Each structure stands twice: as C-alpha cells, then as structure tokens.
Image (cartoon, rainbow, N blue to C red):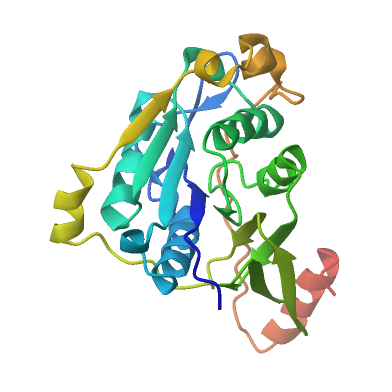
Amino acid sequence: MDNTALNIVVLVKYVPDAQFDRHLSGPGHALDRNESILSELDEYALEAALAVAESRGGAKAGNQVTALTMGPASAAAAVKKSLQMGATAGVHVCDDALAGSDASATSLVLAAAIGSLAPVDLVVTGMASTDGETSIVPAQLAARLGLPQVTFASSVQVDGTTVTARRDGDETTEDIEASLPALISVTDQANEPRYPNFKGIIAAKKKKVTTLSLADLGVAASDVGASGSLTRVTDAAPRPPRTAGTIITDSGDAGIALVDFLAGQKLL
C-alpha cells in the first residue's frame, strides 16, 4: 500500500439553515442568507476526506485537507467550522462580482481555485447543496478539471493511487474505481460527521485561511454573476398556503367514501 501524502480539497458551502423559512430578496430573487450554516451534506464530504487523510497518517504525514468555499464575507463561517472539524487549511473565494452566479459560473470559479492549489490528488464534495439542490456542480467541476468522477458514493477508500467508491442503488451496489487525481461526491449515508471538540476549536484559530478574489484566480467578472450565468430566475412567488383537507366522517360507509375520493383525485 502506497501511503504517499495526499492533497485533498473539500468543497464546503454556506447555506440557509433549513430550520428556518427561506426567503428570496432583490431583483434576481436570490436567497436571503442571513441565517446560514455550513451545509449539512458538505459535512459528510469533509468527514470522508478526513478519514482518507487519517488512514494515511494524517497531517503529521503531510496529508493536507483544504476546505474551499465561494461566497460573501459571511461564508467564511463555513471554512471556520471545517477547520474546527479537522481540515488543515481553508480557502475562501470572495468577490462582489460573484453574486448571482449559477452552477456553471460557480464551477468555473471553483475549478480556477482548485487549479491554484495544484497538484490536487482528490476533490471531495457533498451530493448536493441544500439550497440549490442541483447536484450538477461536481460533474461540471470534474469536466472543467479533466478529472474522472464518481458521484453519490456511500463509502470512499484510497489505496495507493486508486480511489474506490461504493454506490448503493435501490436493488444493486456498485464498487467503482478511479485513478487519482479524481473527484468524488458522497451521500449522507457515507459516514457520521464528527463534532468540533474543544481541542479542534482552539487548533482552528492557528490554521491558515487564504482569501482569493477573481483577479487572484484570473477569472473575469463578466464570466460570473448574473451576466456570466447560463440560467437565471425570472420570476418567483410564495408557495400558496395549504387548504383545508377533506374530512370523511365514518357513518358506516367511510371506506366507500375514501375510495370514491381517491378515484376522483385519480390516485387509484
């Protein structure tokens, strides 16, 4: 088994907390991110990366796990928690021109950021972001970087220069191998993310966080934001309130009434 140190990058995102109602604001119908946290799905990606690094001797053996995020100044909180969980370094791409970027523009910037950290052996992402939920950024990113990709992995192992991922379907399980460097996205079944402990919180204060602008990455402002995006939200409306349901009172024929109702709704 080759225990050569790995340079691993984990994508983390600052997303609205699912415990609160979501709101859109501004002419571009952007999500209000005032009450945001590190995406829960990205915690599984981070845990998978940390486990791979630790299996090869951890940071003491030269393994690097970098948490990479893109977003406004407040998104630094996602990197901060990642460092507290055990990431060895953080990178925050922060630029006013990024506002309104869709998945395509996002993958362009992230690819440039990962390129600045080269050579990168493994890129790990969550299965989706809990705000956009498109699940397409990992594939776009792999294409831009020219990396083999394995998506929706429920386990990740690295042996030498080969990464093996298990993908669980409804009726089958696949074991997929790819040569490093590669990109892996993991599901919420991959592991149990660790909680930041006191030692990790204190250690995070001494870890390096690099802030990069578009100019630092050589990306033009016209290629990101609303002007550089392939998609945009043209209209949005609040979800209509739920209407009162149909109540069936059992007078001896409730079963028949229920069947008639379901048939009328074309559910039978």
Q: Is residue 177 left or right of residue 263?
A: left
Residue 74: image location, x then y, percent: 34, 29
Residue 165: image location, x then y, percent: 65, 72
Q: Is residue 83 left or right of residue 158?
A: left
Location of the N terminus by quadrant is bottom right
Determine which quarter of the picture holds residue 92: top left
Location of the C terminus by quadrant is bottom right
Task: Residue at 69%, 41% (x, y): give it.
Answer: 141
Is residue 137 in view? yes
Residue 30: image location, x then y, percent: 55, 25
Of residues 193 and 207, the one nearer the viewer is 207
Task: Residue at 65%, 16% (x, y): give it.
Answer: 226
Of residues 238 and 181, the one nearer the viewer is 181
Residue 41: image location, x then y, percent: 50, 57
Of residues 107 and 216, the one nearer the viewer is 216
Q: Is residue 59 left or right of residue 214?
A: left
